[in-house]
Image (cartoon, grey):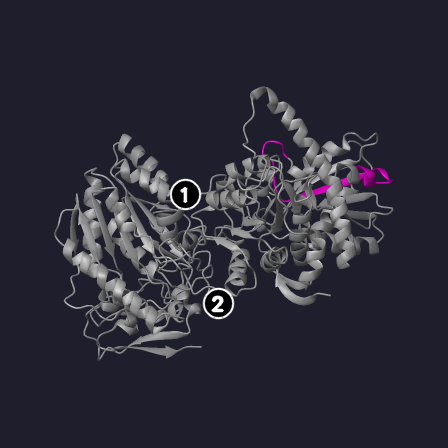
Amino acid sequence: MEAKEDYPEILTIPVKEIGSEPVAHWRVMKPVIKYDLCRKCWVCVHFCPEGVISESEEGPVIDYRFCKGCGVCANECPAKAIEMVREV
Amino acid sequence: MGRLDLLSGNRAVAYGAKLSRVQVVSAYPITPQTPIVEYLADFIARGELDAEYIHPEGEHSAIAAAVAAAVAGARAFTATCSQGLGYGFEVIAQAPAYRAPLVMAVANRTLGWYWSVAADYSDSMTTRDLGWIQLYVESCQECLDGVIQLYKIIEDERVLLPGMICLDGFHLSHSSEPVDIPDQREVDDYLPPRKLYRHTTDPTESEGYVFPVIPTRLHTTYRRLFEGVMQRAKEVIREATREFSERFGRGAYGLLEEYRTDGAEALLVTMGSMSTAARRAVDRLRNRGVRVGLLRVRFFRPFPSEELTKIVEKGGIRAVGIVDRAVSHGTSMGPLGTEVASVLYAMKDRPNIVNFIAGMGGDDVSVSDFEGMVSKLMNTLNKDGVRETVFIEHRVPLAKPSVTFKDVTYCPGSQLCSGCGAALAVRHVLRILGKNSVIVFPPNCVSAAVAMHFPSNWVGVPCVLANYAAAAAYARGLQRAYKYRGKKVYVTVIAGDGCTADIGLQSLSSAAECGEPIIWINYDNEAYMNTGIQRSGTTPAKAWTTTTPVGPRWRGKKELPKDMVSVMIAHKVPYIATASPAFLRDFEVKLRKAMEVVEKGEGLAYIHVQTPCPTGWRFHESKTVEVARLAVLTGMWPLIEVDHGVFRLTVKLPKLRPVAEYIRLQGRFRHLSDEDVAEIQELTNKNWKKLLDLDGKPLW
């Protein structure tokens, strides 16, 4: 019980640099983008509840570390360019 | 004979209330108590329990309604814990004076300070001096038995006090054990129907009533009289628990429970669920020849001083280890420790005392922890006059997140559900607001997800955790401080519908009327989703929730939702809007207008965004945006704004889609007949027409 204090007395949550643990293990279905069908309308980028899809020249890019696999992107894609593939 | 079933502590409490034939139930959801009142709602919906059910807007009212029901002669029941208990505190303080018996279940959870949803006694201990009978239970069986025992005790004319049954949150509330559920007839034989007393407030038959005010010079006298009642209650508790044990074939129940105290040199004193681990430790140590026994305090109020003295005096006990799941900061002891110490003070040969503080915030106290405590206790046997306090700690490192993001207002990885509509709305709010903002978070799913992110956050601006009913007040204080200090900061409240329309409405109304320049985002998932889908003021009519279940007697929520936009219109705040995560451009324009309004100091800006919840509305997680869009396109969630008094439909539809397209996507409306849907269609059409008439017109 006499261990030295390795806890700060006032706990402060950082604001300049924030962070997360990946949540990929939540996923049952994985969204896969079919770039040949993609029209780069970026609907998926806007509607991803997690904000894990970004724009690139090739088309949208999914950060799979943080994709929970909800499938909103696939459901919203007007070109049907996102396929949900079973992962587990 | 009863029947055996596997019940959680919460379900066992609900069964205890049902078997006690409670007549009025009034409660507000709070983790980990919520399932108690969900089960009771279910019993009523199924027609298994004939009781009135009150859905108040917060704990202050929930407890008040239960007290009043008891005052008016009903067998009343309520349940709460932690922050809810804190919010209802003044009502709890006043309840004993009415001398009206009611039972309140407290699924113990730490109160205030650093938050946790798990157990310690820092909530119920704040009420220890108020004159409630307090029972702390160890098992799920005792949860059920305890409720019935409490009604028997508190309704006895020698007592007539409110009673609290305290069960450790999660350790008991959410753990299942085999429980013997007695027959209704057996319980009826033990517990007679609730009587009316001479002072029951009933203009049709009572002789008088209690008005809890007395002159100053009588206060001390009445405190003495009251203390007499508490002391007298001990005899009633002894009788009622003895009778219960005999009738229902249970082990000895009493003010306290003794375990292997014969020949003990050291004694552990515990309360609640941790006593089971303490019992196992005593067994193990006894097998090794260590002479240790256990006392479990069941009733903390009135305190079993006589029983305790008798056991310690009966011989040989030279060290007492009191295990507290609470701290009385500033005394270096816990409340049970100070109580036991004060009782032992009257003894000639006082034993050594070690007060252990353990299990705070839900931390588990294991058998080996107890073995360690006993070993500490045995080490004092060769010393005299020992009185010390030891904290039983389980240190974990403060881990850094494995993926980090610099200079962002938001990063992914929250614990919000997959497909969460609020996650989508909130990340856009944070993007638009930018770094120069502070978020005030009353309890809701989003702030719970912030809390779970410790020691980092996925929100990249400072967040202030506001007490539920005071979110607007926190925002006002922040805003005024920044104003005084000449800073430009967007103070934004991200509140759910429960905070906005129910518990936090009073505070919001005051801030709105006073023209405080703050942004209020009401992310409306149309029920209390954070505690698990209970009805809120904005839950749509007919919707299933866990407190408006569907059964032979109930068919979802009976009432229409509270029209919060009209409430805000009545406050004449400079900017009011509804929004949808399916119409992001519309949402962004509105939020930017809100920012402009507060930047100019014009007053409060209110944005009410509907955020579909796949978990609570029962639809597939991929349909969140589709459901949100259909809400707008069917006219069930019209997108409007009231900009400085001028009303405008911002998404004007030439033709509404049938409401069935929206409703039939959701499981919460599964029980609706075609007639029900037609009724909703008619209401929607009427409302849409009203909005079309208002379009472009000034409202004030």
Q: What amino acid is at disc 1?
A: Ala
Residue under the point 30% across and 33% down: B480
- Whether residue B155 is visible: yes
Residue B4 location, quadrant? bottom right
Q: Mark 2 points at which residue?
A: B551
Does the segment drawn in magenta span residue B23? no
Dot 1 or dot 2: first in sequence order is: 1
Residue that numbered label 1 is attached to: B469
Q: Is residue B312 magenta?
A: yes
Is B488 displayed left or right of B184 in the figure? left
**Residue A1 visible, this angle:** no
Mark 1 touching mark 2, by CB under 8 A? Answer: no
Looking at the rendered image, the quarter that the C terminus of chain B falls into is top left
Name the amino acid, label 2.
Gly
| Disc 1 residue crowd, few under 14, some 14–19, many 20+, Cα 10 Å | many
**Residue range highlighted in magenta:** B309-332
Residue drawn at x 76%, y 30% as measured from the top left: B345
> How many residues crowd mark 2 within 10 Å: few (<14), some (14–19), many (20+)?
some
Q: Total of numbered circles in the picture?
A: 2
Per the image, label 1 sits on a secondary structure element best described as helix
